Image (tube, coloured by chain):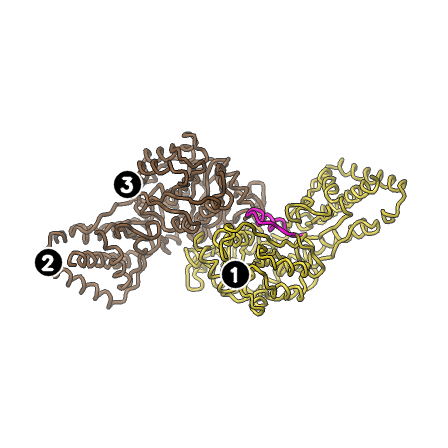
Chain colours: A yellow, B brown
Amino acid sequence: MERYETLSMEALEQEYQSVVAALSAWRDRGVKLNMARGKPSAAQLDTVSGLLTVLNSAEQCKVDGMDARNYGELAGLPCARKLWAELLGCRPEETFVGGNASLTLMHTVISIAYCNGLLNSEKPWCKLDQIKFLCPAPGYDRHFAITKSFGVEMITIPMTDEGPDMDMVEELVKDPTVKGIWCVPKYSNPDGIVYSETVIRRLASMKPAAPDFLIMWDNAYCIHEFDGPFVEFPDIISLCREAGNPNMVVEFASTSKITFPGAGISVLATSVEQLAHLMKYLGVQMISADKLNQLRHVLYLKDKATTLEVARRHGDILRPKFRMVLDIMERELAPRGLGTWRKPTGGYFVSYYGPDGTAKRALELCAQTGVVMTGAGATYPYGKDPHDSNVRIAPSLPPVEELEQAMEIFCLCVRQAALEKLMK
Amino acid sequence: MERYETLSMEALEQEYQSVVAALSAWRDRGVKLNMARGKPSAAQLDTVSGLLTVLNSAEQCKVDGMDARNYGELAGLPCARKLWAELLGCRPEETFVGGNASLTLMHTVISIAYCNGLLNSEKPWCKLDQIKFLCPAPGYDRHFAITKSFGVEMITIPMTDEGPDMDMVEELVKDPTVKGIWCVPKYSNPDGIVYSETVIRRLASMKPAAPDFLIMWDNAYCIHEFDGPFVEFPDIISLCREAGNPNMVVEFASTSKITFPGAGISVLATSVEQLAHLMKYLGVQMISADKLNQLRHVLYLKDKATTLEVARRHGDILRPKFRMVLDIMERELAPRGLGTWRKPTGGYFVSYYGPDGTAKRALELCAQTGVVMTGAGATYPYGKDPHDSNVRIAPSLPPVEELEQAMEIFCLCVRQAALEKLMK
């Protein structure tokens, strides 16, 4: 195998014929494979079936001096706040335990900022002519969808191996219309980058022009190692407090990929002052999130050690899948000089960077061959990848054997797209 | 016993001394009683403990062609949509099944209107100089808190025995800045009024000036009879459709007072077109609500007949409490000519109207004697009861014997407040 860039036109033509034939053969087999979303597999969900039966009597519902079945306790069950604080390294009084989706909590915080304002806002954001948000990219499409839905202008920030390009971030926050930044600090979606301590401290120490600048700290993969042991991670809330920015960050996490994706519990964590402010508005829209599901999770996950055990069971199922993806790319794409990728040890994605201008075409070919992937561009604000290069691969859902087929097809599609470009 | 208005000053003074002495005796006993909120009692919650164990295996989670444990299905489990449609008399495709709080769904709809606009909105409401909402009152304080939090101007609409004063409503909707109306159509909070079919048809047939006028139809007590059999109720969605206003109403309900208040499931129902519009924005803030709790409810509540059976168990516990409240008021207040009230057969409240200018004082005395009630004025927009007359009594939470004590004290406080006013 040789690098495509070194091939003669004749050799390219030959390679093209062979790739087209191989893909055509796959098409004849009529496969239907899905690597679009970071959905846990049924095998993972089966490892936490105990959650279904752990809460089974009215007596258990008397907890923390209240009846968890009834109304009340806006911030969530104290025992659930304690568990989250232990997992995130913050204080229980800094947490608010929500329903089944941290995404909803993120939307709620932006919505409060937009409709009512944050603790240090001069006005609600909807009363301002312009609001901008920094979007390290590639990033999570659902984050960008939230800011977009409020008419926020999104500015793409390139990612480095240590996190967002901080020189650029520090420069941009001098603009008072820049109101915040989206961050997935541990095993970033989709690159799997763990922000370095230097980057985290620079983020916590920023002095943005906007008094209500907001770091949206989506710690989605806080305990989601699949290769190697749990990696301790700095508590952003302490760091912001120590840097004199106590109200600048709101952190989010959930058990969506620890217990059940559709039926987990979520958390929001921030300074006690910012939380008190947010709760004035949270109290208008809810009496509390589902406390019985919070209790179910506390009874099942118990403490940090037990929760890490549960997370390890997921990691054991995910590890061979990620290895399979990386091995096939190493075998099929690396020797041909087709693209680059990192080797994540946690999170839910492999982020592939193909030759410029080939991602859309490669995924179009995938779709035609029965393999559904996250849409090209989805990992960038407005769905626009400036290089048409990045593809988010989600290996978690399919069984290993299907994943192998899907990756074989993906690599063929990448090759065909690259060949088409080289032969143009 | 004589009507206070007929008493001589001397008789009033005597009566006053005796009431003050009785309240002082209660104060010495140091009671602590709460009739502030429509919270179901522990005895009610104990009747639905089966809900805790009905979903107990991974196999059960495969339902409606999907794995309810995993991500997906924004509008909720089809079987849950079907159950709600049966309960409300609408079509499954008109429903969206939410999390544990219909209040959150209501807030979300107003928030979408404010930030993005409804199906027929010319602009998002936040871009308009003025928005007004019609608030039949006395009404539900949490409704008013939602509209207030978005800076909406609230206009009080008097209630009649058949529902809101429709002459006034029809006149006011000619103003294009009037964007909606809050309704609790069956066993209204707090009066327990069931809207008449005439009122409902007039509401459904309105031709408001605002193209995006919104009826917020909070059918909170749709199957919540405690005295007598289930009362069939018109489907507002059909009526609006038939009147040529298909997108004018959004209906809400929940199982908060059928299963567990903190851990039930909720529903939003509207036209298929309005729902598709709302779901564009709902899809930005969630992947779906908790489908396992939806499934738990479907397995437990099964169908309308079974759900009505469950509701009847609550009614059996509530009935003696409501009778106790009404009996004591009949005995202590009616002969003294102190106030008026209706006799609800469903819902969660008794709404007491005392002599003008006495409600605040009566509740202050209650609080001093250890009885917590919903704050005076809470049932009116901005917390301002123009007559300082209405008190919402919530008999559901305390056991019957405590309720009896609380009502004895309440009647003494009403008497003292009335006497103070007469003697001034």
Badge 2 marks a residue whose secondary structure is helix
- Magenta region includes residue B399: no
Image coordinates for residue B99, horizontal then vertical, percent = 48, 49
Residue position for label 2: B9
**Do tags 2 and 3 sit on the same chain?**
yes
Identify residue type, mark 2. Answer: Met
Residue type, label 1: Val
Which is nearer the N-term, disc 2 or disc 3?
2
Q: CA distance from mark 2 to mark 1?
A: 63 Å
Of tags 3 and 1, which is closer to the observer?
Answer: 3
User: Which is in the foreground here, disc 2 or disc 1?
Assistant: 2
- Amino acid at the residue labelled 3: Thr
Q: Residues within 10 Å of mark 3 (few under 14, many from 20)?
A: some
The chain that hosts pointer 2 is B
Q: Name the residue located 40 percent from the left edge and 41 percent from the top edge.
A: B178
Check disc 1 and report the residue beneath it.
Answer: A298
Circles 2 and 3: CB atoms closer than 8 Å: no
- Region in magenta: A138-155
